[in-house]
Amino acid sequence: MRSRWPSLLDRFWANVQEADGCWPWTGAKFSNGYGRISSCGKTILAHRLAWEIHHRQPVPDDLEVLHDCPAGDNRACVNPAHFWLGTQADNIADMRNKGRSCYGERNGMSKLTQADVDALRRRRTAGERMMDLAAAFKVSVGTVWLIVTEKTWRVA
């Protein structure tokens, strides 16, 4: 006897709009634009499920499914041809390259601009004390140290 409830696979394909290029996910999405689907009380990222369906195996535990859509960053895309596997570090680098990170002055908590950081580094290279730089830029000595040692505000 066939269940009256559609399978996860059937529900997945019912929410995919196949087309040339990206395949938009038409089902539920997180606020950040990534598709989602639930199964057995768990929420699954739609693009991750698409990768698993296409490759017929689970995503390795130490890897993530990253997007590389030719038309640009499309978080709702579930076309497995637009995916690649990468580490968390790859994902963070990809996010920064696509301009989606709150890095540097784009971080709402940042007290400094890139121009401030550049000036701070120039002044430190010229020999100014970290304590004086901290006072001038209204940040802690620890923040100055993190910037000049490139632990934060890394040079690209």
Image (spheres, rainbow, N blue to C red):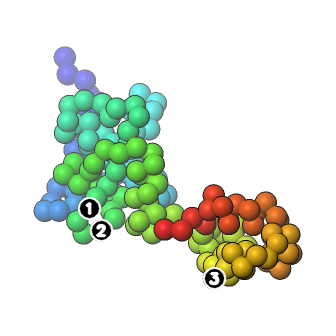
Residue at (45% x, 69% y) in the render: 99
In the image, residue 54 above or below residue 110: above
Of the residues tagged 2 and 3, which is closer to the observer?
3
Residue that badge 2 annotates: 72
Q: Alpha-carbon neighbours of circle 2 within 10 Å: few (<14), some, or many (≥20)?
A: few
Q: Earlier in the sequence, mark 1 or mark 3?
A: 1
Q: Alpha-carbon neighbours of circle 3 within 10 Å: few (<14), some, or many (≥20)?
A: few
- Return the x and y of residue 17 as percentages of the image width and height: 21, 56
Q: Is mark 2 on a helix, strand or loop?
A: loop
Kindly identify the amino acid type of the residue bearing the numbered disc 1.
Cys
In the image, residue 84 above or below residue 107: above
Instruction: Give me the disc on residue 69.
Output: 1
Q: Quadrant of residue 64?
A: top left
Q: Is mark 1 on a helix, strand or loop?
A: loop
User: What is the C-alpha distance between the residues marked 2 and 3?
Assistant: 29 Å
Instruction: Give me the disc on residue 110.
Output: none
- Return the x and y of residue 25 as percentages of the image width and height: 30, 54
Q: Alpha-carbon neighbours of circle 1 within 10 Å: few (<14), some, or many (≥20)?
A: some
Kindly identify the amino acid type of the residue bearing the numbered disc 2.
Gly
